[in-house]
Amino acid sequence: MNLEAVIVGAIVGVAVGWLVRRWLAAARRRKAGGCAGDCGCSAKLKK
Amino acid sequence: MSTPDAGLLVALVGNPNTGKSTLFNALTGLRQRVGNYPGVTVARKSGTCDLGDGQKVELVDLPGLYSLAAASPDEQVVIDVLSGHIAGDRRPDAVLIVADATNLIRNLFLASQVAELGLPVVLVLNQADVAQEQGLRIDTELLSRRLGGVPVILTSAWKGEGILEVRRGLAAALTRRAPLRRVVWPAEIVAALADVAQAASADTGKAIPSADAQRLLFDTNVSTAERLGWTPERREKPLRAARERVRNCGYNPMAAEPLVHYAWLRTALEGVVTEGLGKAGRTSAVDRLLLHRVLGPVFFLGIMLGFFASVFWLAKFPMDWIQLGVDWTKGVVAPSLDPYPMLQSLVADGIIGGVGAFLVFLPQILILFLFIGILEDSGYMARAAFIMDRLFSWCGLNGKSFVPMLSGFACAIPSLLSTRTIEDPKARLATAFVVPFMSCSARFPVYALMCAAFIGPLYGPGWESLVMVGMHCVGLVFAVPTAFVLTRLVLKVKPQPFVLELPRYQLPKPRDVVWRMWQNAAEFVSKAGTVIFAITIVVWALSYFPRDAAVAERIRAAHPTESAELVRARVQAAHVEQSYMGRFGKAVQPVFDPCGFDWKITVGVLASFPAREVIVSTLGVTYSVGEGAEADSQDLRKAMQDAKWPEGPRAGTPIFSLAAVLALMVFFALCSQCGPTVATLAQETGGWKWAAASFVTMTVLAWMVSMVVYQVIIRLT
């Protein structure tokens, strides 16, 4: 495997990993009753 | 004299549209969205307020409300904060009540309810400049004496006047800890309240403060009883007896509170407000035109048309500049990667092409939010809600439901959160269900791309804005019957009265409008640099791999006489077609064929389900024509204009015909393509059932309407 393929593979891998991590973090926020949006706010209504 | 300690908490409360958020901004230096329609503040917003001499307090901006009788969830939050029942938040040490100086008696009703909580209070009479303009004179010293010596301060937060006095007043209130003078109740009502407090205390084993006893006695809402743990079986009898006692002294128990409070307030305000000669009536004169039954909607449509025409016209040159920047970057970066074709394609076609195609719409987004800010801050947005309420009330959604729908034109997520202002859970559910139909700003780049590439060049710039307005109406046109079916047939929502306070017209404050524009621009750029960037890389990888070297040989052998450039373009197209994305797109394309979408558009549509704006960068990647070619938005437009069906009955005809362009725009206008919106809907409706129903309804509807549009127009043209 040449260096070019390694670099491209790493970039694509990081992008996929970041998207998955972000999706999991949003799911955790939702589960905790937080805002599911992209705004990063802490909107939360206590029951 | 003792001084207030750092760490003290002050709650900011008041009716909607009293300038509460502007005052909060002035006191804390933080920025906050300044809206003109009720209920704009939903989340907890706080900041540090300097009282002078290094004394600092934490200021919490609470949602605007008219009364402490909680009807909606956000009103309940205010009551919970003020009574110290929000988990993790302490009870405030003082309350800063903001009242509209032009309408004191109505605004002081809330203040008189807050008085029952016994907290130190500072009363701020905002919009003093308007009161003065209207010829109103307010004797703040007399009012302060009547209300128990609490600081009463005149401000004009919009102009920054009186802010220092508010800081001083707050410091004084925290030191003296004087509460507002309480309303004097008739003896029979006092006795009824005592009965309620005693019964509740006996049943729950808790001490019941008078504020809670009042909520238990006067409200039909049971949130206070539930919080105290007073069960329906135990509370029913004592409450009925206490209400009977109130009735016996001549009051309807449900109306006793406002009647007693207003009678008390009328006495307290005697001689406080004197009316002189003012120039009131300017707003009324303008409203006679803008809210006219016939002319109102005409003005509204005209304003919207002008709005979108300006967006196109003003954004043209900055868009070209960004385009030049993207082209320049690509021209510098691509040649340096010549020895590495895979990396070159990733950087040039994928990252720069995809992200650049998205970023080029930044000027239009900026101008869009500039105009939205001007419309909101000038007071026109509330009028728009009023006009739309008249037009759509027949579908079971009143103006209060329409406010989140209107803000859905910016983004569905905060709009879904703002449905918390709707009291009736069924009406709230119906509103939340139709909010995603509203044409949010993420759809804007899709419309803009299609209009700039096809509608403008084919029919002229006037049609661009007309199609834009049309696309923004498509969602509304389908939201209304959907709401009708939901409210009348499925949920059977009872009609509700709608009270909308129309703020006075005012010149938008440039600082607030520019700040909001800046915030949205920052969000747009940050999205381009994060989510769009990552998705672009994934889309590029899926449309690049696998790559079979034999394909190039076969094409060269099959076209020996063609130029090297043409062969290279054919090879590139064949590679994309054989990629994972190409194979997937071709497999799914038959589903979208009746809508006129080829496999590349299909790929774009499918990739856009997590976030609809991804279509632009996806098309930027899939329509990139060969290594080193400029897959920027200008070239994307050109590549889309030149794209033709390669085979089948439509072979040789443009893929992006008028029918396909309109079908694609309609699909994006109606389809549920936003992961966070679906998740927020699930969160706000308490489960995935309604979110799934919304997703399926919108997506099926989008496909059907898009198919009808394509099939009808293709036969007519």
Image (tube, coloured by chain):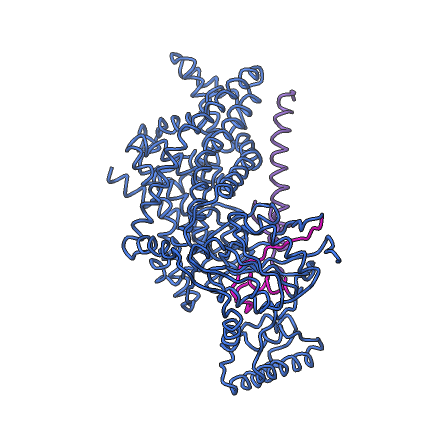
Chain colours: A purple, B blue
Residue at x-position 57% and y-position 48%: B25
Please indicate whether residue B121 sits to the left or right of residue B553 in the image.
Answer: right
Give the residue furthest to the bottom: B248
Q: Residue B78, position in %: x, y?
A: 59, 62
Q: Nearer the viewer, residue B394 or B390?
A: B390
Instruction: Give yes or no for residue B67 being in the magenta stretch.
Output: yes
Q: Nearer the viewer, residue B111 or B440?
A: B111
Q: Quadrant of the C terminus of chain B?
A: top left
Q: Is residue B649 above or below residue B74?
A: above
Image location of residue A5, percent across then percent down: 62, 23
What stretch of residues is rendered in magenta? B54-82
B257 over B632 or under it: above or below: below
Residue B240 picture location, percent across and down? 56, 84
Compared across the picture, whether B194 is left or right of B704 comes to right
Going by the picture, which residue comes out furthest to the right?
A: B2
Q: Residue at x 52, y 71 (%)?
A: B265
Q: Residue at x 44, y 66 (%)?
A: B491
Return the residue nearer the eye: A10 or B229. Answer: B229
Q: Is residue B189 above or below residue B660?
A: below
Q: Give residue A22's quadrant in the image.
A: top right
Q: Quadrant of the N terminus of chain B?
A: bottom right
Across and down, in percent, residue B333 comes to 55, 19
Decide whether residue B65 is among the magenta residues. yes
The total number of labels drawn is 0
